[in-house]
């Protein structure tokens, strides 16, 4: 959701005049941070910016509403209802990025709600492992020897991953 919100922020910054641009300047993390982690003065600034920039404010509120589903919902039935409600509201905002996200959520709703039927287990560990496996592929620009690549995967716990940037 943060990538969509940041995309909306950049688009908004391009569409407004110079005075409003200065209001938005250096406020990226204000929109991306969790509201409960903000200082009181930062919360006030965020509220003011949400009022000035309606589309960005709506998207920011929708981000927080989506986060609250994971905090408040207790079972998969409640989650499904909450996500459907969120998608309905997202469509009403008429913000194309939120509508696209609503479609994605609706298309994957069963898989999302499984989170609550598996006692809040996620696939984060598997995603992390997949990223570790993709790392040597990126470093070598692919691989030719399948057996050697499998050995490299087995050696991943002993390998220190470093960025080449």
Image (cartoon, grey):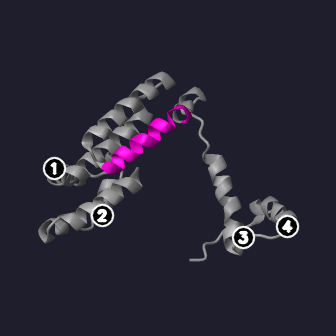
Q: Secondary structure at mark 1?
A: helix
Q: Which residue is mark 1?
A: 51
Q: What number is the disc on residue 10? A: 2
- Distance (Cα) linking label 3 and label 1: 49 Å
- Distance (Cα) linking label 4 and label 2: 44 Å
Q: Which residue is mark 3?
A: 142
Q: Nearer the viewer, mark 4 or mark 3?
A: 3
Where 13 falls versus 115 (above or below)? below
- Distance (Cα) linking label 3 and label 2: 34 Å
Residue located at (18% from left, 54% from top): 53
The span shown in magenta is 96-111
Q: Quadrant of residue 148?
A: bottom right
Q: Secondary structure at mark 4?
A: helix
Q: Position of residue 140 (x, y in %)?
A: 72, 74
Q: Which residue is mark 4?
A: 148
- Distance (Cα) linking label 1 and label 2: 17 Å
Q: Position of residue 133 (x, y in %)?
A: 71, 60
Q: Position of residue 157 (x, y in %)?
A: 75, 60
Q: Nearer the viewer, mark 3 or mark 1?
A: 3
Question: Does label 1 or label 2 sit earlier along the sequence?
Answer: 2
Residue located at (27% from left, 52% from top): 39
Residue 20 part of the magenta-drawn span:
no
Q: Say whether residue 8 is left or right of residue 111.
A: left
């Amino acid at each position: 959701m943060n990538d969509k919100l940041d995309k909306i922020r950049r688009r908004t910054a391009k569409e407004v005049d110079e005075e409003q641009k200065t209001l938005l300047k250096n406020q990226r993390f204000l929109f991306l941070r969790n509201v409960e982690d903000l200082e009181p003065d930062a919360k006030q600034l965020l509220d003011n910016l949400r009022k000035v920039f309606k589309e960005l404010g709506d998207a920011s509120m929708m981000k927080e509403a989506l986060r609250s589903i994971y905090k408040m919902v207790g079972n998969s039935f409640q989650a499904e209802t909450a996500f459907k409600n969120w998608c309905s509201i997202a469509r009403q905002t008429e913000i194309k990025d939120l509508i696209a996200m609503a479609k994605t959520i609706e298309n994957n709703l069963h898989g999302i709600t499984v989170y609550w039927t598996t006692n809040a287990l996620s696939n984060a560990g598997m995603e992390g492992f997949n990223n570790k496996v993709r790392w040597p592929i990126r470093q070598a620009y692919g691989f030719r020897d399948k057996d050697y690549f499998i050995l490299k995967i087995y050696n991943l716990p002993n390998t220190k991953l470093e960025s080449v940037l």
